[in-house]
Amino acid sequence: MKKKLGFTLIEILVTATIIGLLAAVASISYSQLTKQSRDAKRKTDLEQVRAALEIYRSNSDTYPVGTGWATLSVLTGPIIYLQTLPSDPKSANFSYYYSGDINDYTLAAQLEVSSSCSSGAPGGSSCGSGSPCNYCLGPYGQK
């Protein structure tokens, strides 16, 4: 009787298919994790801006007034409480937005993994790339 010294074509195809499926699952998981980490960075950035706005309010008794939705660059006063003005971790096409008056404000950003704003999105349309903002923050205890 002869001994087999190699693998059959079926065995090789089954092994290649299993390796391919594992690689696909790993790739999808990695993609989701990177989106979630960028979203966590966005939320952290907005929390830092929120803290700076609260410090600003405790010193001046008002929040900065914005005319409609604008990027964070309009926040000239509270910026002194931040080391650097945060920017979106993915690209410069996305921005963080601010809208406010002396008693209230809303910060907004676009998350990659969906969420929803309790108040309106900037301009009702986009966060810079044609996609709507879907994450909003306001004063502590309000939004």
Image (spheres, rainbow, N blue to C red):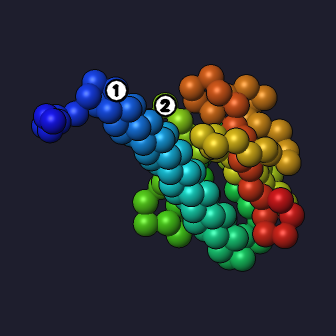
Where does label 1 land, which residue? 10
At 43% from the left edge and 60% from the top edge, which residue is drawn? 84
Q: Is residue 119 left or right of residue 39?
A: right
**Secondary structure category for the residue under label 2:** loop
Q: How far apart are the alpha carbons under marks 1 and 2? A: 49 Å
> Which of 80 and 10 lies nearest the eye of the viewer?
10
Name the kind of residue labelled 2 in the image: Asn
At 86% from the left edge and 64% from the top edge, which residue is drawn? 142
Q: Please identify the residue farthest to the front as the structure is shown.
A: 1
Name the kind of residue labelled 1 in the image: Ile
- Packing grade of label 1 (10 A; few <14, some 14-19, many >=20) is few
Residue 93, label in figure: 2
Q: Is residue 9 left or right of residue 54?
A: left
Q: Name the spot of residue 4 as percent of width and height, x first.
A: 17, 36
> Which of 94 and 66 lies nearest the eye of the viewer?
94
Which quadrant holds the N terminus?
Answer: top left
- Packing grade of label 2 (10 A; few <14, some 14-19, many >=20) is few
Mark before the other along the chain sequence, 1 or 2: 1
At 50% from the left edge and 51% from the top edge, which residue is drawn? 33
At 70% from the left edge and 56% from the top edge, which residue is drawn? 64
**Secondary structure category for the residue under label 1:** helix
- Total marks drawn? 2
Is residue 91 in view?
no
Q: Name the spot of residue 94 as percent of width and height, x first.
A: 53, 36
Q: Name the spot of residue 13 as percent of width and height, x first.
A: 34, 27
Q: Name the spot of residue 21 as percent of width and height, x first.
A: 44, 36
Please say if the residues under marks 1 and 2 sit with CB atoms less than 8 Å apart.
no
